[in-house]
Amino acid sequence: MLLYALVGLGLPSCAFFKKGNTPVVTEPDEGQEQALTFNDVTLEQANAEGEIVWKVRSPSARYNDEQKITYLETPTGELFQEGQLVYKIQSKQGQVHGDGSKIVLQDEIVATALQNQAVIRAQELEWLPAEDLLLVRNNVKGTHPDLEITANEARLKSKAQRMELVGSVVATTQKNPALQMRSESVVWQMETDQIISDRPVQIDRHLCEKPQDCPASDKAIGDRGELNLETNVVTLEQQVQITLSEPPLTINSDLMRWNIDAQSVTSERRVTIVHPKQTLTLMGDRGTLELASSIISLFGNVSGVRQVPSTEFKADRMTWVIPTEEFQAEGNVFYRQVNPPFTVTGPKAVGKLQQQTIVVTGGDVVTDVVP
């Protein structure tokens, strides 16, 4: 069965056939010397069903019978999966190994994924058609309508629409504001527009289209994370911390969702919020921060401590308005201040901690004044 054909357009034609497992070079016409170097060649391979697997063109090719490798100069070509064109490729140097089961490219590689228009540039490429695997290594840079990426290595699966990125990965969204995700290992699920990492990850928000044009205004870290390119939502898990510049807050939890477009941060697990300028620390079993209105809502075992002036309170749920420092609390409200010293409990409360003014209402209210 013909595995791949080499058609010499400038020199007498020559073809590789499979006889057992050993490709051989057909003899030229009588009286001519055997030629192993060819000009203007096209190599292609088809599978048992007759579907094309790959096609590569080169202005110059050289076949080494001992190594069973065809060496190519400035090759260009197409790679197929189940008869469908999935990648276009080009480079300065290339090799076809053995019976055509592996293609290797080196130096100034450009690979274009036709399904999503991602363009990958690197210095090394390896195509394993039987595994539907495209390996790209060494200074990998990728562009896409939604994303720019850099990494040490990329592994692409066309049928699964999946790209695995390894080593110093940086993924930057093509939006304003731009998000930049950093990790040592990232999976890009192209069909669902998800960037996923099961390793420690950092995501920076830049209030411009190009991160190099402005410093990060907000930062988020976690032991693993996900960025949904379609919804523009960041999800982080385990030892999560989000640091915001406006309002100036640090938020810690084991699970947080940061909706960039809706300007909100939510957590369904125990959350701690620190406002350094207000010397305030708030905690709750779950909570929401609305960035546009600068309002914090906490639910379940809520507690708050302010260092200056020294006050603390507890409640079942609470709302804190950051600009005015006003709060509303409901359910088992407890309030204590140091100077002058007193405590008060009741069902509901409103007040301002910085002015030490609080009104407790709604039933049994108990005040304890320490002389």
Image (cartoon, rainbow, N blue to C red):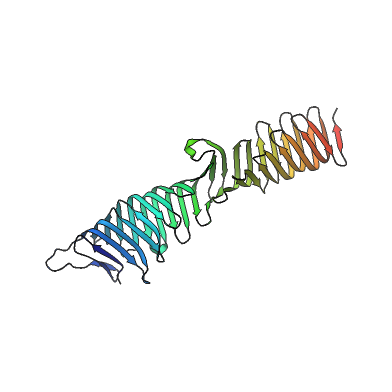
Q: Nearer the viewer, residue 366 or 215?
A: 215
- All told, the count of numbered labels is 0
From the top left corner, tell me how far across and down residue 282 is, in percent: 70, 39
Whether residue 40 appears in this view of the structure is yes
Horizontal side of 213 relative to 129 (left or right) equals right
* Residue drawn where x is 48% and y is 57% of the image: 162
Whether residue 65 is visible to the viewer of this picture, yes or no, is: no
Q: Is 262 drawn above or below residue 275 in the view shown? A: below
Q: Position of residue 146 (x, y in %)?
A: 49, 49
Q: Is residue 315 above or below residue 90?
A: above
The image shows residue 281 at horizontal and vertical percentages of: 69, 36
Which residue is drawn at the image coordinates 65% and 40% (left, top)? 292
Between residue 364 and residue 234, name the one nearer to us.
Answer: 234
Question: In the visual, does 129 lie left or right of 223?
Answer: left
Q: Could you tell me residue 226's position as x and y percent?
A: 55, 50
Left or right, 221 with respect to 90, comes to right
Q: Is residue 261 left or right of residue 362?
A: left
Residue at far right of view: 364
Q: Residue at x 83, y 37 (%)?
A: 360
Quadrant of the rendering where the C terminus is positioned:
top right
